[in-house]
Image: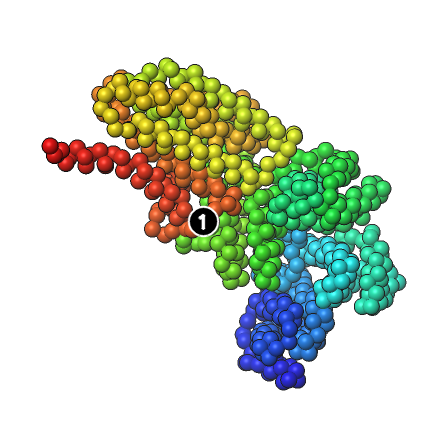
């Protein structure tokens, strides 16, 4: 049976014409699926599926073999097919990794040759077959190829830049593979351990020339011997790790060293941010936060591996490595003690690289976000959709707050569109959240990631364009006017409606003022606390904003229903208002509508002050606040000129519209906090101005909630009209 399966896979199907990079992706993804099949019990169905997938691999290779040319990949493909057909899971896992490493090596050679010849297009194609940086991005290679294509870089310089990045990424992946091999061996996960060994062997072969140049032929021979022993003795890999402890394939430039040091600090700090929310009393309370804490620790260790060989203070480098290792042990045990380890590591990073590394929030996000998107594509391509979803959330956490808060003052519509692309997108163009949930094809996922990267490049250009004093004033004014207008209109319309129905608005002015002052104080207190005392994750902030908006909407709907309740006599209405609409309720509404946007508004101004001088920002703040207050005053003043009945109906309609806006914003906030699913619809217009100013999104859930609120508000009015139209029977 096994010989028949092997024969089928070698002879299956005609050769498929394909690009080398799509063929390589087929080989990688199908080999991963075969590895997962081998975990199952052997059955005729399993053998048949393995044969089918091996046939697809063979067909993909035959379609691109001529472009790859002769090399080790041919033998690796045959060895993998033999192991898979024989049902040898460990050897299939090992050969799968060796096959991918050999494909990468062949592609690297073609790409470097194309660059040396000045062919940027061919190089760009071959560079699709590679590992992407998990820690520090891949901007150097991308920029080098682009600069070559535009005639801004000569072929030799482009080749050197790309080769340096490929070697650096491979060295980082080699260190990660050694770490994972030790973990899998300790956990007696022998199939995974075999895959780790294949990964290590393949990367050592990929780096062999550079390893020989940097460490010498004797050290490389010792590594080969240790790798051979590791098949039966996992402890042999400790010797390999020791040989590579001081290895760096290329020397980092000062700019690159600072960039990676910023990422090292960012990832290290995020370990405690996520861990403290993910573990309570020795138990995992929030699985996503716990997983991300481990992920950030691993990223920090990867970057330290890149930086350590160039650190002047060897003792600091060794202590940092020890701290990260100890942090991992504590996290594995779900125990206390992570915070002091992280704090000591942060102090060492600041001491080793300077205080400038602590100011790299935006810079770190710009570097890390593209790498996170590339990793998402990689893990999705291997079929690990649960990991892909975590990668998506990680990428969004880089966008919001670091990039979004800098972008909103300059281009709020662009920020809104980018945020949607990380989540459900639109009915015609699904976003990452929808694509991951639907297990989309690699092409669809790659197209959306490419689109997000293009938007991010445009956003970065806007953010980094120097801001004039006039521009700072206008952007500052726009922030406060946009964020404050809704609250001012709600409070002004409420006061106007009360006056139109005969109640005394003066009774509630102190309550409104108290609620506003308390909300402003709470917004600044939350900002200060999040900056110096504790942390608020991106999703938690979205949940706070969404939940506050919904509570405010409930209070506002209740008030609107009370103001429009049946009862013809003004005295009765005043009594009802006195009994139901207390000063405390009005104060609570004032607090909620101001606090909902207050914290985020503080963050927007903090981001704007990075790009602009304080005086223009302050001038814009006064201008925007004055404009919002003027709108409220105009609403109140119009009540003196309009008939009371007409004015009451106008303010009631305005309050109803604002309640609908609050509901839409609240549901949308909970969706971006990953608490409620989102379903885009094509029948509702997708307009930025509708979303920014009216809280109307082309998404089913907020639209349904808003429709329900409209029904709740309109039904009593229709009921009264119907009763008035039907003559009473005696």
Q: Nearer the viewer, residue 361 or 704?
A: 704
- The residue indicated by pointer 1 is 678
Picture quarter containing residue 100?
bottom right
Residue 314 is situated, as x and y percent measured from the top left of the image, at: 84, 43
Q: Find the residue positioned furthest to the front.
A: 730
Q: Quadrant of the N terminus?
A: bottom right
- Horizontal side, residue 463 vs residue 163: left or right: left
Residue 166 in view of the camera: yes
Q: Nearer the viewer, residue 709 or 348?
A: 709
Q: Residue at x 42, y 51 (%)?
A: 679
Q: Find the residue positioned furthest to the left.
A: 730
Q: Find the residue positioned furthest to the right.
A: 218
Residue 117 is situated, as x and y percent measured from the top left of the image, at: 64, 62
Q: Residue at x 36, y 37 (%)?
A: 660
Picture quarter containing residue 7?
bottom right
Image: 547 above or below 81: above
SS at mark 1? loop
Q: Residue at x 37, y 45 (%)?
A: 704
Residue 181 is situated, as x and y percent measured from the top left of the image, at: 76, 60
Q: How many marks?
A: 1
Residue 431 is situated, as x and y percent measured from the top left of the image, at: 48, 52
- Horizontal side, residue 328 vs residue 623: left or right: right
């Amino acid at each position: 049976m096994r010989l028949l399966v092997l024969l089928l896979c070698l002879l299956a199907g005609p050769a498929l014409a394909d690009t080398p990079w799509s063929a390589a992706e087929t080989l990688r993804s199908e080999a991963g699926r075969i590895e997962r099949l081998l975990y199952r019990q052997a059955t005729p169905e399993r053998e048949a599926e393995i044969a089918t997938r091996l046939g697809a691999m063979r067909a993909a290779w035959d379609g691109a073999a001529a472009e790859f040319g002769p090399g080790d990949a041919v033998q690796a493909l045959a060895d993998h097919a033999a192991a898979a057909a024989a049902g040898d899971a460990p050897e299939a896992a090992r050969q799968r990794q060796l096959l991918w490493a050999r494909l990468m090596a062949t592609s690297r050679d073609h790409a470097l040759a194309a660059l040396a010849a000045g062919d940027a297009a061919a190089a760009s194609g071959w560079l699709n077959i590679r590992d992407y940086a998990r820690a520090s991005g891949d901007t150097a290679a991308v920029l080098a190829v682009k600069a070559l294509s535009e005639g801004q870089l000569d072929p030799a310089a482009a080749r050197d830049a790309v080769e340096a990045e490929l070697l650096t990424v491979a060295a980082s992946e080699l260190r990660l593979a050694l770490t994972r091999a030790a973990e899998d061996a300790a956990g007696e996960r022998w199939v995974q351990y075999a895959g780790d060994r294949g990964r290590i062997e393949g990367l050592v072969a990929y780096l062999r020339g550079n390893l020989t140049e940097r460490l010498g032929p004797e050290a490389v021979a010792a590594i080969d011997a240790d790798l051979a022993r590791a098949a039966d003795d996992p402890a042999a890999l400790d010797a390999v790790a020791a040989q590579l402890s001081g290895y760096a394939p290329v020397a980092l430039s000062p700019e690159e060293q600072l960039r990676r040091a910023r990422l090292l600090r960012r990832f290290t700090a995020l370990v405690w941010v996520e861990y403290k929310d993910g573990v309570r009393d020795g138990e995992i309370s929030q699985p996503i936060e716990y997983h991300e804490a481990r992920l950030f620790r691993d990223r920090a260790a990867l970057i330290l591996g890149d930086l350590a060989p160039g650190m002047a203070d060897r003792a600091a480098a060794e202590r940092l490595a020890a701290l990260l290792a100890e942090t991992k042990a504590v996290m594995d045990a779900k125990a206390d003690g992570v915070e002091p380890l992280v704090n000591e590591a942060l102090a060492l990073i600041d001491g080793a690289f300077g205080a400038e590394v602590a100011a790299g929030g935006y810079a770190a996000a710009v570097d890390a976000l593209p790498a996170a998107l590339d990793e998402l594509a990689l893990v999705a391509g291997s079929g690990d959709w649960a990991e892909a979803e975590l990668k998506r959330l990680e990428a969004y956490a880089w966008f919001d707050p670091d990039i979004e808060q800098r972008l909103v003052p300059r281009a709020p519509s662009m920020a809104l569109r980018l945020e949607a692309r990380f989540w459900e997108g639109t009915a015609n163009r699904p976003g990452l959240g929808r694509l991951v949930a639907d297990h989309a094809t690699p092409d669809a996922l790659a197209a959306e990631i490419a689109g997000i990267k293009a938007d991010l490049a445009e956003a970065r250009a806007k953010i980094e364009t120097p801001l004039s004093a006039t521009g700072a004033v206008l952007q500052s004014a726009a922030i406060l006017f946009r964020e404050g207008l809704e609250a001012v209109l709600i409070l002004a319309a409420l006061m106007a409606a009360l006056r139109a129905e005969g109640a005394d608005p003066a009774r509630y002015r102190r309550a409104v003022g108290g609620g506003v002052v308390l909300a402003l104080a709470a917004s600044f207190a939350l900002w200060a606390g999040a900056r110096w005392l504790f942390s608020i994750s991106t999703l938690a902030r979205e949940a706070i904003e969404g939940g506050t908006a919904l509570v405010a909407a409930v209070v506002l709907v209740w008030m609107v229903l009370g103001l429009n309740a049946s009862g013809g006599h003004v005295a009765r209405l005043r009594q009802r208002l006195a009994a139901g609409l207390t000063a405390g309720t009005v104060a609570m509404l004032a607090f909620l509508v101001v606090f909902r946007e207050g914290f985020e508004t503080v963050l927007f101004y903090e981001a704007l002050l990075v790009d602009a001088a304080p005086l223009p920002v302050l001038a814009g703040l006064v201008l925007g606040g004055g404009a919002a207050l003027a709108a409220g005053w105009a609403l109140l003043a119009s009540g003196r000129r309009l008939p009371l009945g007409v004015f009451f109906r106008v303010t009631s309609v305005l309050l109803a519209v604002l309640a609908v806006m609050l509901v839409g914003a609240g549901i949308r906030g909970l969706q971006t906090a990953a608490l409620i699913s989102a379903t885009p619809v094509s029948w509702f217009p997708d307009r930025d101005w509708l979303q920014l100013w009216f809280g109307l999104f082309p998404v089913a859930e907020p639209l349904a909630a808003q429709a329900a609120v409209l029904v709740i508000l309109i039904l009593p009015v229709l009921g009264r009209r119907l009763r008035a139209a039907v003559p009473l029977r005696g």
